[in-house]
Amino acid sequence: MHFLQPTTWAEALEAKAAHPDAVAIAGGTDVMVAVNFGRLRPARLLDLTRIEDLRQWDTEDGAVRLGAGVPYARVITELGDRLPGLAMAARTIGSPQIRNRGTVGGNLATASPAGDAHPALLAADAEVEVASVRGSRRIPVADFYTGVKRTAMADDELIAAVRIVPPSGPQQYSKIGTRNAMVIAVAAFGLALHPARRAVGTGIGSAAPTPRRAPAAEEFLAGELDGSWDSRAELPSATAARFGELVAEAAAPIDDVRGTARYRVHALSVMARRALTWAWAEYRTDSRDSPKEA
């Protein structure tokens, strides 16, 4: 196994162009587990830890541009107010050691259906910025996942950053596992309310071949809330229940060692209903939420 260690982004892209089979590694929390268990034997590892640009975040055109190498711990401590849904998801990931090493970029590159960041990114309408020596492009996160652990990236591309517009309303994230900590999700759900554009975002994890949204649930809820964004009226319990049902209907889970398909469907309906109840209650009481924001 050859080990490539570029020190600049340009060198990394050149190395990936020369060796498309090279597997990128940043935190190593997914890659090294696969290597240690013999599930992955790459001819080359492309270490990205010396590229400082990947470990930075900034704001650009109203969006947070989160470098692919920013660890979860910094998302929690530095971006909890700007990206609350992603910070909630980050808090559920592994142990402090894992959160200090693991990155959102790595989660995206692995593209596991159970990746914890995916539901929050889907709900927030994030974009994945990928690059190669040919140039860079942005991929809507909903189009990024093409199959089980497969993505829309070309063989010579690397993930540079994730772009997320801070929400104009509350976000929520729920995850259920076989225990309370350091666990792979049996099912996960992300929700974002976007009062500025009268829209709702959802994200489903670990309950389909790829992370996915629940479009019918989003359309239903946006319609139900059409007259309530300004009045902030109380949410009918029947609306929350139906929303949960539609989220569950969007899933396509399987039975595995962590849980049955039937259990995952039930769990998603409960998590979606609760997430909506919590988010709407926060929206009703928080005067800072303004439809003037992006």
Image (cartoon, grey):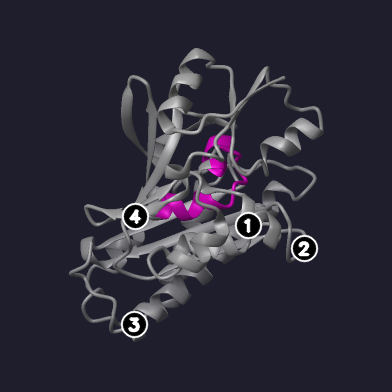
In front: label 4 or label 3: 4
Q: Which residue is mark 3?
A: 284
Residue 269 is at least partly visible in this image: no
Residue 274 is at least partly visible in this image: yes
Distance CA(mark 4)–CA(mark 1): 20 Å
Residue at screen point 71% across, 59% down: 177
Q: Residues within 10 Å of mark 1 (few under 14, many from 20)?
A: many
Q: Which residue is mark 1?
A: 99
Q: Residue furthest front?
A: 7
Residue type at mark 3 is Arg
Bounds of the magenta segment: 106-123
Distance CA(mark 2)–CA(mark 3): 32 Å
- Is 53 situated above or below 135? below
Helix or strand or loop: what does disc 3 sit on? Answer: helix
Which of the 4 image quadrants contains residue 59? bottom left
Distance CA(mark 3)–CA(mark 1): 32 Å
First along the sequence among labels 2 and 1:
1
Residue at screen point 34% across, 82% down: 284
**Residue 89 in picture, x, y percent from top left:** 55, 60
The label on residue 179 is 2
Would residue 259 appear left or right of 276 to someone viewing this image? right
**Residue 221 in picture, x, y percent from top left:** 35, 62
Q: Which residue is mark 4?
A: 58
Query: Magenta stretch containing residue 3, yes or no?
Result: no
In front: label 3 or label 1: 1
Secondary structure mostly taken by the magenta-highlighted segment of the chain: helix
